[in-house]
Image (cartoon, rainbow, N blue to C red):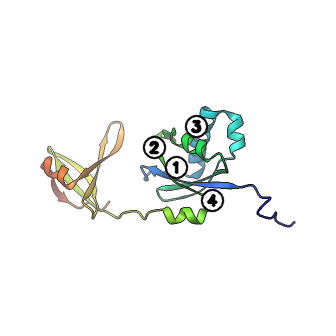
Amino acid sequence: MKRLPPTLREKRRYILVRIIPGTISADERELYYAVADCITSLYGDTVAALMHAATIRREGDYLILRCRRGWETKLCSAVATVRMVTSTPVHLETCAISGTIKALRKQIRPQKKGDPFVCTINSEERDGIRYPDGKIDLIRRDMKGQEVVFLTQDDMEMFHATTTKSNGI
């Protein structure tokens, strides 16, 4: 069977979404279910069926979604309402919209590599990651799970934090 010419094909739009935090262990299917639930709860089943939303692939901290042309604004607003994926708090942020996947792949920023370390703040040892640009992510673990706390070098000096050792995270 021959392919349809471009003028007769269904036009689609691709949306690049950043997953915050990027360390979430959900796969494409679980992310799709979270987005589909938000589309259905926000707009209903009819709009969800007309939109033809789908996940294309996940690349690190980013997810590429697909929908029919003309529905991308509604999909972006539904993506913004996603709060939980597999009982893990998450925030999805729309980065770009394009007609091709190739154009979206150019928008994906490389992940920053950081050095793991352990620091002491108010006599509590905490694991963290120090990035070359001076930003620091502290990982706070307690009874409710773990949470990432974002700091800068100035914040560390304000707390009088001391770096003790590298732990090889």
Identify the disc placed on residue 99. 4
- State the CA–CA distance, disc 4 to disc 3: 23 Å
For the residue marked with disc 1, what is the amino acid? Ala
Percent across and percent down for residue 104 are 55, 61
Residue placed under numbered mark 2 in the picture: 90
Q: Which of 164 and 40 is in front in this view?
A: 40
Nearer to us: label 1 or label 4: 4
Percent across and percent down for residue 125 are 20, 49
- State the CA–CA distance, disc 2 to disc 3: 13 Å
Identify the disc placed on residue 108. none
Q: Nearer the viewer, residue 86 or 51?
A: 51
Q: Which of marks 4 and 2 is nearer the N terminus?
A: 2
Quadrant placement of the N terminus: bottom right
Identify the disc placed on residue 38. 3
- State the CA–CA distance, disc 2 to disc 1: 10 Å
Label pair 2/1, CB-CB below 8 angstroms: yes
Q: Which of 55 and 48 is in front in this view?
A: 48
- State the CA–CA distance, disc 4 to disc 2: 26 Å
For the residue marked with disc 4, what is the amino acid? Gly
Q: Is mark 4 on a helix, strand or loop?
A: loop
